[in-house]
Image (cartoon, helix red, strand yellow):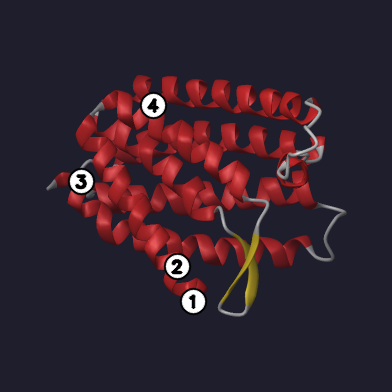
Protein backbone atom coordinates (compact mmCIF):
# COMPACT_ATOMS: atom_id res chain seq x y z
CA UNK A 1 0.00 0.00 0.00
CA UNK A 2 2.96 2.35 0.47
CA UNK A 3 3.31 2.82 -3.27
CA UNK A 4 -0.33 3.89 -3.56
CA UNK A 5 0.03 6.26 -0.62
CA UNK A 6 3.20 7.64 -2.19
CA UNK A 7 1.31 8.44 -5.40
CA UNK A 8 -1.57 10.03 -3.44
CA UNK A 9 0.89 12.12 -1.42
CA UNK A 10 2.59 13.34 -4.59
CA UNK A 11 -0.73 14.28 -6.19
CA UNK A 12 -1.78 16.14 -3.04
CA UNK A 13 1.47 18.14 -2.98
CA UNK A 14 1.13 19.14 -6.63
CA UNK A 15 -2.55 20.02 -6.21
CA UNK A 16 -1.97 22.20 -3.18
CA UNK A 17 1.08 23.81 -4.82
CA UNK A 18 -1.14 24.81 -7.75
CA UNK A 19 -3.70 26.08 -5.25
CA UNK A 20 -1.04 28.21 -3.55
CA UNK A 21 -0.08 29.57 -6.96
CA UNK A 22 -3.67 30.66 -7.55
CA UNK A 23 -3.81 32.30 -4.10
CA UNK A 24 -0.80 34.48 -4.88
CA UNK A 25 2.71 35.38 -3.76
CA UNK A 26 2.00 35.28 -0.03
CA UNK A 27 0.52 31.79 -0.24
CA UNK A 28 3.50 30.53 -2.27
CA UNK A 29 5.95 31.97 0.27
CA UNK A 30 4.07 30.25 3.09
CA UNK A 31 4.00 27.05 1.01
CA UNK A 32 7.79 27.05 0.64
CA UNK A 33 8.28 27.39 4.41
CA UNK A 34 5.62 24.84 5.39
CA UNK A 35 6.96 22.24 2.96
CA UNK A 36 10.46 22.73 4.35
CA UNK A 37 9.25 22.27 7.94
CA UNK A 38 7.30 19.14 7.02
CA UNK A 39 10.26 17.70 5.09
CA UNK A 40 12.64 18.19 8.01
CA UNK A 41 10.15 16.62 10.42
CA UNK A 42 9.06 13.67 8.28
CA UNK A 43 12.64 12.78 7.34
CA UNK A 44 12.84 10.82 10.60
CA UNK A 45 10.36 8.17 9.46
CA UNK A 46 11.63 5.30 7.36
CA UNK A 47 9.25 3.59 4.92
CA UNK A 48 9.53 0.79 2.36
CA UNK A 49 8.95 1.53 -1.32
CA UNK A 50 9.37 -1.18 -3.93
CA UNK A 51 11.31 -3.24 -1.41
CA UNK A 52 13.74 -0.45 -0.44
CA UNK A 53 13.94 1.56 2.77
CA UNK A 54 13.63 5.32 2.18
CA UNK A 55 12.47 8.38 4.11
CA UNK A 56 8.94 9.73 3.84
CA UNK A 57 9.99 13.32 3.23
CA UNK A 58 11.54 13.60 -0.24
CA UNK A 59 8.33 14.69 -1.97
CA UNK A 60 7.90 17.59 0.48
CA UNK A 61 11.46 18.83 -0.04
CA UNK A 62 10.84 18.84 -3.80
CA UNK A 63 7.48 20.53 -3.21
CA UNK A 64 9.26 23.39 -1.45
CA UNK A 65 11.59 23.92 -4.42
CA UNK A 66 8.61 23.72 -6.77
CA UNK A 67 7.12 26.64 -4.83
CA UNK A 68 10.33 28.62 -5.37
CA UNK A 69 10.17 27.93 -9.10
CA UNK A 70 6.56 29.11 -9.17
CA UNK A 71 7.61 32.33 -7.45
CA UNK A 72 10.33 32.98 -10.02
CA UNK A 73 8.19 32.10 -13.00
CA UNK A 74 5.06 34.02 -12.03
CA UNK A 75 6.50 36.76 -9.79
CA UNK A 76 10.24 37.50 -9.54
CA UNK A 77 13.62 36.14 -8.54
CA UNK A 78 13.66 38.61 -5.64
CA UNK A 79 10.40 37.15 -4.30
CA UNK A 80 11.89 33.66 -4.43
CA UNK A 81 15.06 34.86 -2.72
CA UNK A 82 13.02 36.49 0.04
CA UNK A 83 11.05 33.28 0.47
CA UNK A 84 14.24 31.29 1.17
CA UNK A 85 15.20 33.65 4.01
CA UNK A 86 11.68 33.52 5.44
CA UNK A 87 11.82 29.74 5.20
CA UNK A 88 15.19 29.57 6.98
CA UNK A 89 13.94 31.98 9.67
CA UNK A 90 10.97 29.75 10.51
CA UNK A 91 13.05 26.59 10.33
CA UNK A 92 15.41 28.10 12.89
CA UNK A 93 12.44 29.13 15.06
CA UNK A 94 11.03 25.61 14.93
CA UNK A 95 14.41 24.09 15.78
CA UNK A 96 14.71 26.27 18.90
CA UNK A 97 11.15 26.03 20.23
CA UNK A 98 11.01 22.27 19.64
CA UNK A 99 13.97 21.84 21.97
CA UNK A 100 12.44 24.21 24.53
CA UNK A 101 9.25 22.16 24.38
CA UNK A 102 11.14 19.06 25.46
CA UNK A 103 12.29 20.78 28.66
CA UNK A 104 8.72 21.08 29.94
CA UNK A 105 8.12 18.53 32.69
CA UNK A 106 5.07 16.47 31.69
CA UNK A 107 2.21 16.04 34.13
CA UNK A 108 1.55 12.60 35.65
CA UNK A 109 -1.39 12.22 33.24
CA UNK A 110 0.57 13.04 30.08
CA UNK A 111 0.99 10.26 27.54
CA UNK A 112 2.78 12.16 24.74
CA UNK A 113 6.21 13.04 26.17
CA UNK A 114 7.92 9.89 24.90
CA UNK A 115 6.57 10.51 21.39
CA UNK A 116 7.76 14.13 21.41
CA UNK A 117 11.11 12.95 22.77
CA UNK A 118 11.52 10.50 19.91
CA UNK A 119 10.49 12.96 17.19
CA UNK A 120 12.03 16.20 18.40
CA UNK A 121 15.26 15.12 20.08
CA UNK A 122 17.18 14.94 16.82
CA UNK A 123 20.95 14.95 17.08
CA UNK A 124 22.53 18.41 16.60
CA UNK A 125 24.49 17.05 13.64
CA UNK A 126 21.36 15.95 11.75
CA UNK A 127 19.54 19.16 12.60
CA UNK A 128 22.34 21.43 11.41
CA UNK A 129 22.98 19.30 8.31
CA UNK A 130 19.31 19.32 7.35
CA UNK A 131 18.81 23.08 7.81
CA UNK A 132 22.10 24.08 6.19
CA UNK A 133 21.78 21.80 3.18
CA UNK A 134 18.15 22.80 2.62
CA UNK A 135 19.09 26.49 2.57
CA UNK A 136 22.07 25.89 0.24
CA UNK A 137 19.94 23.87 -2.18
CA UNK A 138 17.23 26.54 -2.19
CA UNK A 139 19.80 29.20 -3.08
CA UNK A 140 21.23 26.99 -5.82
CA UNK A 141 17.79 26.21 -7.24
CA UNK A 142 16.89 29.90 -7.50
CA UNK A 143 20.05 30.71 -9.43
CA UNK A 144 19.96 27.62 -11.64
CA UNK A 145 16.29 28.02 -12.52
CA UNK A 146 16.92 31.69 -13.35
CA UNK A 147 19.86 30.62 -15.58
CA UNK A 148 17.63 28.15 -17.44
CA UNK A 149 14.89 30.77 -17.79
CA UNK A 150 17.30 33.27 -19.37
CA UNK A 151 19.31 30.76 -21.41
CA UNK A 152 16.35 28.82 -22.80
CA UNK A 153 13.39 31.21 -22.89
CA UNK A 154 11.62 29.00 -25.41
CA UNK A 155 11.63 25.93 -23.14
CA UNK A 156 8.41 25.19 -21.32
CA UNK A 157 8.06 25.85 -17.60
CA UNK A 158 7.59 22.12 -16.94
CA UNK A 159 10.87 21.22 -18.68
CA UNK A 160 12.86 23.97 -16.93
CA UNK A 161 11.37 22.96 -13.59
CA UNK A 162 12.21 19.29 -14.16
CA UNK A 163 15.83 20.07 -15.10
CA UNK A 164 16.27 22.40 -12.13
CA UNK A 165 14.81 19.86 -9.71
CA UNK A 166 16.88 16.97 -11.08
CA UNK A 167 20.13 18.91 -10.57
CA UNK A 168 19.22 20.55 -7.25
CA UNK A 169 17.97 17.28 -5.76
CA UNK A 170 21.21 15.52 -6.63
CA UNK A 171 23.05 18.28 -4.80
CA UNK A 172 20.65 17.95 -1.85
CA UNK A 173 21.05 14.16 -1.68
CA UNK A 174 24.84 14.28 -1.98
CA UNK A 175 25.38 17.04 0.60
CA UNK A 176 22.94 15.74 3.22
CA UNK A 177 24.15 12.16 2.93
CA UNK A 178 27.73 13.17 3.70
CA UNK A 179 26.96 15.98 6.17
CA UNK A 180 24.31 14.11 8.15
CA UNK A 181 24.82 10.39 7.58
CA UNK A 182 28.51 9.75 6.88
CA UNK A 183 29.87 7.41 9.53
CA UNK A 184 26.37 6.47 10.70
CA UNK A 185 25.40 4.18 7.81
CA UNK A 186 27.15 1.24 6.20
CA UNK A 187 27.29 2.79 2.72
CA UNK A 188 26.65 6.44 2.02
CA UNK A 189 26.72 5.78 -1.72
CA UNK A 190 23.90 3.24 -1.45
CA UNK A 191 21.83 5.85 0.40
CA UNK A 192 22.62 8.48 -2.24
CA UNK A 193 21.70 6.25 -5.20
CA UNK A 194 18.49 4.93 -3.65
CA UNK A 195 17.29 8.28 -2.31
CA UNK A 196 18.04 10.04 -5.59
CA UNK A 197 16.21 7.36 -7.58
CA UNK A 198 13.09 7.94 -5.46
CA UNK A 199 13.42 11.69 -5.98
CA UNK A 200 13.60 11.21 -9.75
CA UNK A 201 10.29 9.36 -9.62
CA UNK A 202 8.76 12.23 -7.63
CA UNK A 203 10.14 14.82 -10.07
CA UNK A 204 8.71 12.88 -13.01
CA UNK A 205 5.29 12.83 -11.33
CA UNK A 206 5.51 16.55 -10.52
CA UNK A 207 6.58 17.46 -14.05
CA UNK A 208 3.61 15.62 -15.49
CA UNK A 209 1.24 17.95 -13.62
CA UNK A 210 3.01 21.32 -13.45
CA UNK A 211 1.97 21.95 -17.03
CA UNK A 212 -1.37 22.85 -15.45
CA UNK A 213 0.31 25.91 -13.91
CA UNK A 214 0.31 27.62 -17.32
CA UNK A 215 -3.29 26.67 -18.02
For marks 4 and 3 on the same chain, the one whose residue lies earlier in the sequence: 4
> In the image, which is nearer the foreground, mark 3 or mark 2?
2
The Cα atoms of the two marked residues, 3 and 1, are separated by: 29 Å
The Cα atoms of the two marked residues, 3 and 2, are separated by: 24 Å
Residue 199 x %, y % = 51, 60
The Cα atoms of the two marked residues, 2 and 4, are separated by: 30 Å
For marks 2 and 4 on the same chain, the one whose residue lies earlier in the sequence: 2
Residue for point 78% across, 32% down: 106
Label 1, residues with CA under 10 Å away: few <14, some 14-19, many ≥20: few
For marks 3 and 1 on the same chain, the one whose residue lies earlier in the sequence: 1
Residue 155 x %, y % = 23, 49
Q: What residue is disc 4 on? A: 80
Looking at the image, is 67 positioned above or below residue 100?
below
Label 3, residues with CA under 10 Å away: few <14, some 14-19, many ≥20: some
Farthest residue, direction front: 109
Q: What residue is disc 2 on? A: 5
Marks 2 and 1 in Cβ contact (< 8 Å): yes
Marks 1 and 4 in Cβ contact (< 8 Å): no
Amino acid sequence: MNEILFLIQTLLIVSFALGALKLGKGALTAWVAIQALIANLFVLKQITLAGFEVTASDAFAIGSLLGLNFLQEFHSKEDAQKATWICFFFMAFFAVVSQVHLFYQPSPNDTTQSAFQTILSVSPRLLMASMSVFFIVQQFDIRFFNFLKNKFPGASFAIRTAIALVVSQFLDTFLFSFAGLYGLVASVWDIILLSYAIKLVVIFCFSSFVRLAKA
